Amino acid sequence: MFACIFIPDFPVQASLLPETKETRDRLRCRPVAIFDGPSNLPRIAAINDSARALGIEPGMTRLQVETYGGVQLRERFADLEDEAQEVLLECGKAFSPVLESTFPGAVLLDLAGTQRLFGVPQHTACKIAVRVRQAGLHPQIAVAANPDAALYAAQGFPGITVIAQGEEARTLAPLPIGLLPLTPARLDTLQAWGIHTFGALAALPSVALVERLGQEGFALQNLAQGRAARTLRPIAAPPAFNASYEFDDPVETLESLAFVLNRLLDELCADLISHALSTNELKLTLYLEVMQRRHDGRDERSGEEYVHHWKLPVATQDHALLFTLMRLDLERNTFSAPVREIFLEAVPSKPRLAQGNLFAPPSPEAEKLEITLARIRGVVGVTDEEQCNCAGMPRLVDTHRPDAFSVDAFSSAKPGSTTVSALAPMIALRAFRPALESAVELTGNTPHFVRLWKKYRRVLAASGPWCSSGDWWKDSIWSREEWDVALQTTDGVGYYRIYLDRIKKQWFVAGVFD
Amino acid sequence: MPALALLRAQIESRIPSAFAPMRRPETPRILTGIAGVDSLTEGGIPMQALSEICGSGKTTVLLSLLAQASRQHYCALVDARDSFDPETAKAAGADFSRLLWVRCGKSRQKLPPLEQAFKVADMLLQSSGFGLIAVDLGDIGEKALRKVPLSSWFRFSRVVENQPTALVFLERQPHATSCARLVLQLSTASANIAGNLLTGFTLHADVVRTREKKHAQSAAASFLVKTQWA
């Protein structure tokens, strides 16, 4: 047997769902209209029975409905309808593990094998109705031997309808054919023939109907007779890919931890492979056991967590790669306490589809590159003091601030730049980071001597001043006066960029032209 | 006909190249984008080899090389003193989406920047897939560089021999000695100043060492490089 939960005027009921029970009950007796569409011309998308009784129809403009007076007008929100559908599914899950979310406001349940739990279909339908009402929605329930019969009965009859096996055609007969999945043209054709109900369609001679409407006509007649048989399209909960392990005694060494981690990752990757999935995001949580001494001298356990995320540019199922990345990261960290429990979670994603290209430049293998980058981060560090990555792809920041850049994650999986800029060799600046503090002796307004590497150097030529400033609306305000100077050094003449930080009133050497 | 010549003729009749000297396949090269340097080096920086670019003007040549190389290859820049200026590199035409920039000595790591740079270069070579690996040691002191054992340079040159990668070191003075296939010494000949505006430099390049052809050794060229705003 199959049960259908149908919520009439679903957008209206969904919009009332966040309200309190009293407000819902009060508004249910009053005309409510839901409007939707562009802000300059919103139209009515759904109404309740009270509004229908007033003569309001879907498709009317908001202004037209406002002239009625006393109508509660509400905007349509897709989020509210999604939440209401979730509520409906949750109610259904209490009665059957096999559910189909047929369309917003309709859920089909397979009741096979539930009779000993919930009783005869009539009782089950009553229990479902009570459950859905408790959740804040007013349903129409139907139970039938096939899903489509239950669906049309729930849409067509108020309250609870139970159709005995073999009685489908007779029960569904008075329903209007508008409930069937018909195109407007086909509906017009049938109505032109004088067919207005399921019963009239069911009574037509099958051969003559097929001659005129083809296989579609035969399928429609089966639906009208309640004979159409199909299987449900059950909703499947997204599989969760996680693994955990609790140690009998907290572990202190990386080897012990790595041994278990390797096993967990192996399980996780096998699980992913069995679902034909990969992962590009891993989350590791280590629960640390911290012992704290209380005032009375006893030790008390308290928990601390170490959480780390790995985001890979490419999806992978390779447990060896993931394990190496984890191990390299764990080697860089030291923990304040031994590890009591491990929890590992993988975010599933579709496997990477790689198509070789004869004309693409040879590139580092993405998986191998990730390990190399992790190893490099182990040598040079992850970020500098300004939280800028120590290894990655340089990117210019959209600002006039000199020497402003960021370093993004490097990946060989990303396509190269498609714009080809004209190449012309240019004098490069070697930056001093941080800029070297200096002192400058001026003659008039022009630098005459510059202190560099603890010695004052004579300025042979100077170009400037080039003034710039910015971010005056922030704490990071900057303002500088730049000069390009030729300095006499022991190796000969050197060309440097110096600047006066007008906020700090201090001279700096920014770099050397090389 | 003496017996030896007869034997040779008999072998050559069956295996014609048996006594011919083995010809080395032509080494692929990456253009630097500076016509003077490219003609001087007979086609640019050699791949499958270690090269050194030294002196004043090395960064200019490096950026031009990166701009050319990043059009066809993935490139890595190991920056021992974090002196790379992305703005100039972008203006020179480098494709950042194919450039891995490793900034050494920026975090609280125990290793000195020189050792970090060498370790990273080694890792990148092992990783393979990069067409150009440039190691910028331009701001590392001469004293520290002179202490680098010759075996390190030798190891780099042997590893890179089997890879389609150009390994380029930027230094003030050459240190790799015979391990380098090409040593390019640069110097600033003069600065071009229009009014009080610096518009460019005339650089002088000298091939100090090359293993390609004897007559190419000690060849020199001068060329003009403009500033970004000229």
Image: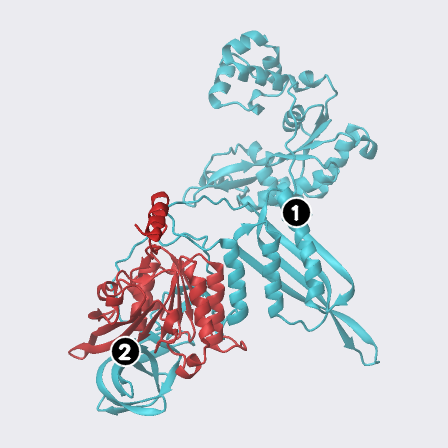
Chain colours: A cyan, B red
At label 1, the amino acid type is Ala
Mark 1 highlights which residue? A270
Tell me the element at label 1. Answer: helix
Q: Nearer the viewer, residue A360 or A172?
A: A360
Give the vertical position of A166 relative to A240 (above or below): above
Residue A219 appears left or right of A95: left
Residue A350's image quarter?
top right
Residue A389 appears left or right of A128: left
Residue B21's image quarter?
bottom left
Give the vertical position of A81 relative to B55 (above or below): above
Q: Position of residue A451 (x, y in %)?
A: 32, 90
Q: Identify the chain of the residue marked 2, using the numbered disc in the image.
A: A
Q: Identify the chain of the residue marked 1, using the numbered disc in the image.
A: A
Q: Position of residue A188 (x, y in %)?
A: 48, 18
Mark 2 highlights which residue? A467
Give the vertical position of A445 relative to B173 (above or below): below
Q: CA distance from mark 2 to mark 1?
A: 61 Å
Q: Which residue lies at the image location 29% right of the left edge and 85% below the top edge?
A: A491
Q: Nearer the viewer, residue A349 or A422?
A: A422
At label 2, the amino acid type is Cys
Check residue A453 in the rendering and tell me which mark sits there, or answer none.
none
Q: Crowding near pointer 1: few (<14 within 10 Å), some, many (20+)?
A: some
Q: Nearer the viewer, residue A508 or A302?
A: A508
Quadrant location of the C terminus of chain A in the rendered image: bottom left
Q: Is residue A295 visible?
A: yes
Q: Which residue lies at the image location 44% right of the left edge and 75% below the top edge?
A: B150
Q: Which residue lies at the image location 51% right of the left edge and 39% below the top edge?
A: A68
